[in-house]
Amino acid sequence: MELQSLTNCEKLVMKTVWDAERELELADITQRVNELYDKEWKPQTVSTFLARLVKKGYLKHYRKGRVFYYQILIPQKDYLGEMAGQFLEFWKRENVDIFLAALEKRSAAG
């Protein structure tokens, strides 16, 4: 399964949803993404990114009263696996040792 790519802004919104312990509504997502990533996005901006994520199949939404809640369709683990696979495919599998060494160096520094 090849997932559609996400823009950096869509990744921030999706990561916010993945990190939540429950399904969130627009106001919650807006507040969290602004706090976590030092943004000043308006609800309309976040709503646009959420609509794109729904269209790309990462989320679905449902209405409860007057509020829409967002439900994860693509788990973070699946996304990370797909992105890692695409990365390795691009850099060719023979460079896996170089990639792992760079990753190890980065994690040791942090």
Image: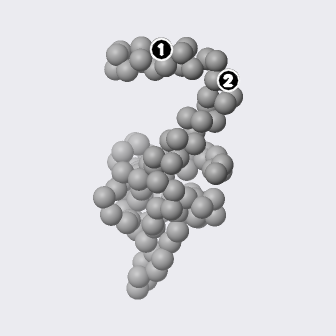
The secondary element bearing badge 1 is classed as helix
Mark 1, residue position: 101
Q: In the picture provided, is 31 more to the left or to the right than 95?
A: left
The amino acid sitting under disc 1 is Ala
Label 2 sits on a secondary structure element that is loop
Reading the image, the residue beneath label 2 is 92
| Quarter location, residue 108 | top left
Q: Please give the name of the residue rendered at 64% of the width and 18% of the height, measured from the top-left corner.
A: 94
| Residue 10 relative to residue 36: left or right | right
Residue 10, percent from left and from top: 55, 50
Badge 1: how crowded within 10 Å, few (<14), some, or many (20+)?
few
Q: Give the mark, 1 or 2, whose residue is nearer the N terminus.
A: 2
Can residue 4 be seen in the rendering of this structure? yes
Residue at x 31%, y 58% (from the top left corner): 21
For this orientation, the residue located farthest to the front is 94
**x, y percentage for residue 17?**
42, 56
